[in-house]
Structure formats: C-alpha cells, structure tokens
Amino acid sequence: MKHLGVFSEQGGFSMALSALAREQVMSDPINEALVLYTGFGSSPFPRAKTPQLLARFGQAEGVELKQRILLLLEELQQPLEGPERRSRKSITERAIEQLQPKHPELDEEGLRALAWTYSFGLR
C-alpha cells in the first residue's frame, strides 16, 4: 500500500501500516475508546463521556484509556512545524499528520475522532 498521508484530497484518511502496526491497531482498544469518549459519530460536538468509557472498559482500563486520550489531545496542541498561514482545516490536517507517525496504534477511525475533536477547539 502506498503511503499518501493522513488526509487524501477528498478529505479521507489513508494509512500504510506494517504487519506489526496492524496487529497493534487491532489489539489496542484506544481507537474504540477515542470514539466512545469523544462522542464521535454519535454527538453533534465533542464531549468527555467518561461514564460510557468506564462502563465499556471497566474502572481500571477505562481510567488508563482516558489518560491516554487526554495525552493524545495534549500532544495535538503542540506547535505545528512549518508555515502558520493555513486555513483551519489545514491546521487540523497538519496536526493529525504530525501525530500519526508517532502513534501507529491509531487507526483511521481513531484519527478521525481526534481530528474532529481538535477541529472543534479551533472554532
């Protein structure tokens, strides 16, 4: 699979994952947790849904996943590399593209949930 970056020209995600990274994505609950915690796909705006996260994953794992999510969101807030003159969409795209290589455990849906949440913070 050819790596085309996180966003295609049509606004979709594309990822090139090694076999090891694919295994990690499939076994790591972070992607499901991101969707559940942020409300991606079920809420008109991002919201912290801690009770749903704890109900799905249990107290110990839910707390750990919430901490990982908060760290990912914090990482997205770091200054972007390169020129600053971009549209809001470009900022979101660039932030996710900067984050993606550091986190091969994130799949397309997890990255979309992060991008959606991040873009609301820019408004």
Image (cartoon, rainbow, N blue to C red):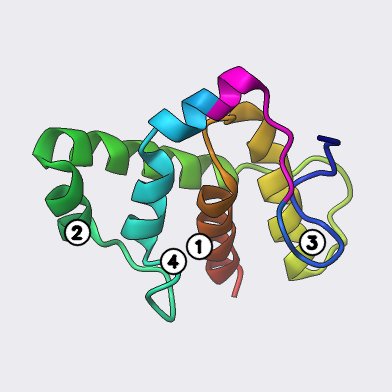
Q: Mark 4 vs mark 1: which is more N-terminal?
A: 4
Residue 40 - label: 4
Mark toward the start of the polypeptide (3 vs 1) = 3
Task: State the SS at label 3.
Answer: helix
Mark 2 vs mark 3, foreground winner is 2
Pick the quarter of the image with the N terminus.
Answer: top right
- Location of the C terminus by quadrant is bottom right
Tag 2: amino acid: Gln
| 109 to the left or right of 57 | right
* Earlier residue among tags 2 and 3: 2
* Segment colored magenta: 14-22
Residue nearer the viewer, 71 or 97: 97
Label 4 crowding class (10 Å Cα cut-off): few <14, some 14-19, many 20+? many
**Up-down: is 60 above or below 121?**
above
Residue drawn 43% across and 38% down?
71
* Numbered tag placed on residue 117 in the rendering: 1
Where does the image place residue 103, in percent across and percent down from the top left?
Answer: 57, 31
Tell me the amino acid under the disc marked 3: Ser
Q: Is residue 56 above or below residue 40?
A: above
